Image: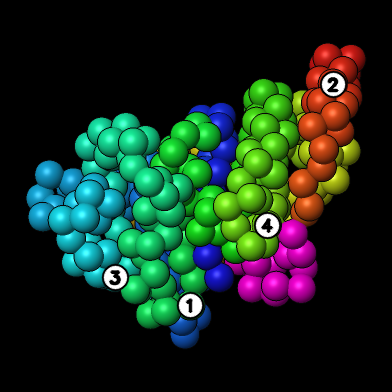
Amino acid sequence: MLFVLASQKGGVGKTTTAINLAACLGRGDGRVLAVDCDPQSTMIRQLGIEGRWLAVTLVDVLAGRAAAGDAVVADVAPGVDVIPAARELSGVEMALVAELGRERFLSDALEPITADYDQVVIDTPPNLGLLTVNALICADVVLAPVSCEDEASVQGLVELRATLAKLSRLRDTEPGLATLLTRWAPGRVLSAVIDAAVADLGLPPLVRVPTRAAVGQAGAQHIPLALSAPDGCVTLAYEQLAAELADPVQLRAERALSWDRFAGELVHAGARLRGEL
């Protein structure tokens, strides 16, 4: 299974989710490949990887200078390998615009090594640009984190689903679309409102990841929270997410709706948020 973390809204916990999901999936007997597609390289920084010492990155792979296997950094966490990003990915993205089949460069690059892994987790930039589109073309399941501290992330979810609908012409099947809530605080009005707005879109969250200071501390310490605090409530939420994703029966694709329905959903969600906040 190939999971893509995507949201056009930054600060929703996308990279934190990618790292901890990979760490939780890697605890079993299988192997997990994490791919950092974000030019900001937040994933590898949070894993304590010094980008300046890397001889090969995803930049070289997409530019055709190296094979994907050459870019793999092994065992960044138990059972987890990673393909690192670099800031030059922004330039690669611009160069791909003029290329034929530009939406499939990542898929073609990863194809020779995906069979070596049981799961692949891809982190994407906080936008719906060409790097994100390349990742979405690969996806079996798209995971959309929605922050309970930012109502705009609900609109980002609607726009992500619209993008998946437009990309359906480029693939034989649509990927599944699943949501999770991050920075969730039970009893807080905004958390309840955003939870309801996401459910109203027909995408009830698989899990609710509670807000905790330990999440930011784990990033600063360059250790996935799933490893540094294995019994914490945040880790337990990500373990639940990994368990949900391991059951493909629960991940039937959420079929794209018409543009009119998208507009109606967005108006409804916005009205609900404005009326209850």
Mark 4 lies on residue: 174
The residue depicted at 68 percent of the width and 57 percent of the height is: 174
User: Which residue appears at 47% of the width and 42% of the height?
Assistant: 132
Gap between marks 4 and 2, in whole Å?
25 Å
Q: What's the amino acid at mark 3?
A: Asp
Of the two numbered discs 4 and 3 on the same chain, state the one appearing first in sequence.
3
Q: Secondary structure at mark 2?
A: helix
Q: Quadrant of residue 163?
A: top right
> Is mark 3 in CB contact (under 8 Å) with mark 1?
no
Across and down, in percent, residue 241 comes to 64, 61
- Few, some or many residues within 10 Å of mark 2 (<14, 14–19, 20+): few
Give the foreground label among 3 and 2: 2
Tell me the residue at 47%/85% (across/down). Answer: 29
Instruction: Name which residue type carries label 4.
Output: Glu
Q: Main secondary structure of the magenta part?
A: helix
Q: Is 255 left, or right, of 238 in this rendering?
A: right
Q: Residue 75's mark?
A: 3
Q: Which residue is tagged 2? A: 267
Of the numbered discs 1 and 2, the one sitting upstream in the chain is 1
Comparing labels 4 and 3, the label whose residue is closer to the camera: 4
**Gap between marks 3 and 2, in whole Å?**
46 Å
Crowd band around label 3 with a 10 angstrom C-alpha radius: few (<14), some (14–19), many (20+): some
> Badge 1 is on which residue?
118
How far apart marks 1 and 4 lie (CA) works out to: 21 Å
